[in-house]
Amino acid sequence: MDSFKRFFKRWWGSKSAPLIVILLMAIALMSKQLLTHSVLLGADSIFHFNRFYDTAMQMKTGKFNYFQANFGFDQTGRVVNAIYGPVISYLSGALLILCRNWYMFQSIQAIIFLVIAGMSMYLLCIKNNVSRGYAMVIGILYMYSSQLMGWITTQQFAGVGAMLVPLLVLTGTEAINKKKVSIPYLALAMTLLIQTHVMSTIIGFIAVVPLFLVALLHTNHKFKMVLHTLIAAVITLALTANVWGSALELFGSNYLMPVFPVANMEDYAFRFDHYSWYSLVKPVEMVVFLFVIYYFVRHFKHSDIVTRTLTITGTFFLFASTTLFPWLTLQKLFPILSSNLQFPKRFLVIPFVMLLLVFGKILTYDDHIFTLRAFEHPKLFRYALLFALIGINLGINGYNMDFKVDKSNQMVADKYPWAPIAHSYMYVKHNHHTIKQDFFGDNWQYLISDINKATPDYLPVKANLKPDDYNKLHPYYTAHYQLIIPNLDHDFDKHVNKDGSLTVVWKNKSFSSKNIQVPAVKYANTQVTLNGKKNANVKTTEIGAIIAKSKVGQNVMTIKYVNNQQFNLLMIVFVISWLLMIIYLGAKLIFRF
């Protein structure tokens, strides 16, 4: 027994202990899905599965096209990954290649993301002098928060961005504590977020501005701090040249379909209803937030500048994420918010990071909080309370997952998932695959071809769409009938060429030439070759679907997105800057040991 205690004490003090603890807690969270062999389908699952499938097939076949989706999204040649988390898309594609099926991929990817989130929060706590044990607890609480669960249960990509937000907040607290800006780490934190989820980057950036302003006020080297911040910004631009370069390339010559504008932003805020308490901020989490705010007010004079900045900023974002904030008024004044920010609940990531960090600091520095002196071990009640917090969160998350798991199992058992599938999914039954083959078979295409959903984001449109114009266009309905339905009868044969172009073949069975609407998309820089004629003069629909002059008999059309030379130069900058960053980080790691 003594030897076991010595071993445990030695292991607990090792550098690997936090990682192992957080990994085990991540597996515990995913245990229901792992044990039932379920694939969880949420509102955005098929959209992201198409993204990852496309990059996986590019790497597997060697037929690359950075802009054009030739394998995913019904092989329509549309652009998604180039401006939506390109690096995380290719990393996920590589993981899909390593996994046998969608079940393995989804489970392993979720565990990886959870561990990264937990360790990011743990690192933030440790760097802010939270004791090791409490830092692990805070890391687990963050990992179990609604921000990460949004990815696990419904595949909302903001959950993937949330796993990296603690690293960005860390650059702000370090700026205050050390009165200087770490150039490489600020650049790397911003870069990782931009390469993952741009909206999370914007929200995170707004949230750390107060931290950097406070740091600037308290440093004696103001010019140096501003200079270092600007240098970090330049490095970030180099490391993300592929993202903003793609945006310049596409938006400079196209009008792209925006995300759908919400009619009432309050509907997507924390509404103090059943859904909000179970899926956005669980009751025990709100209790923690309110306790932190109460404690801060009571002990304001004794709090340090980091705690003050974190608590005030986190509290503001908590308020802004609820229906108590005047979102209807703001939406009327700034209609663009309805199609850019869309969901005020996105702001919740900030209080989950900042207020949980302050909670860890309180636990570390106040030895009397949550203790009962009547006990032989006064802190025993504190530990029991923290374990209860984790347990309750785990239980509620498990309850939320049960619905998805049951639907998944019902789909596999019934082989007819019309009822279980919501969110405008369409089940293509005549492909003759079972749902079990889709989930567990080694042909990844089965799932994304059998279960489909129209997603019009980033399609080329004729003009810049305002919210009213968007609604009149009915983009989801239009994309469904122009880009999905024509593929179902297999009238169009598609294959990908070695140069990254996409060839579409069809037959005109009439006795004269006529215009045919082809389920393929043309952007301004998409080169179209029709029946051997390069740069063919074709028309497009209101969402960019090609209308081609079809001769009698067989027709062959090849499309290839040809980017400009400026983008090629930016890609060179992107690759070189990443190589230099990897060399720098590698050298730091080697000399550290």
Image: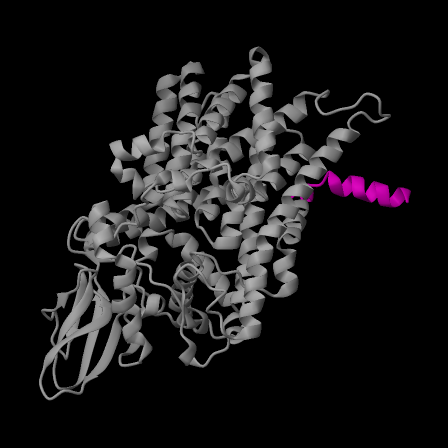
Quarter holding the N terminus is top right
Is 260 contained in the magenta span?
no
User: Where in the figure is residue 177, as x and y percent of width and height?
Assistant: 52, 22
| Front one among 162 and 413 | 413
Identify which residue is drawn at 49% across, 26% down.
Answer: 315
User: Where in the figure is residue 257, as x and y percent of width and height?
Assistant: 25, 53
> Which quarter of the picture shows residue 386?
top right
> Which quarter of the picture shows residue 555?
bottom left
Q: How many marks?
A: 0
Vertical position of residue 331 compared to residue 406: above or below: above
Vertical position of residue 549 compared to residue 379: above or below: below
Identify which residue is drawn at 41% across, 56% down.
Answer: 89
Q: Which residues are magenta?
A: 1-18
**Lateral position of residue 287 relative to residue 233, left or right:** right
Vertical position of residue 253 compared to residue 75: above or below: above
| Front one among 63 and 377 | 377
Residue furthest out toward the right: 1
**Chief SS of the magenta region:** helix
Is 14 contained in the magenta span?
yes
**Lateral position of residue 513 relative to residue 182, left or right:** left
Vertical position of residue 280 compared to residue 407: above or below: above
User: Where in the figure is residue 233, as x and y percent of width and height?
Assistant: 34, 34
Q: Is residue 249 visible?
A: no
| Front one among 128 and 181 | 128
Identify which residue is drawn at 18% across, 68% down.
Answer: 546
Q: Is residue 321 visible?
A: yes
Quarter holding the C terminus is top right
Identify which residue is drawn at 45% across, 59% down.
Answer: 45
**Lateral position of residue 403 relative to residue 519, left or right:** right
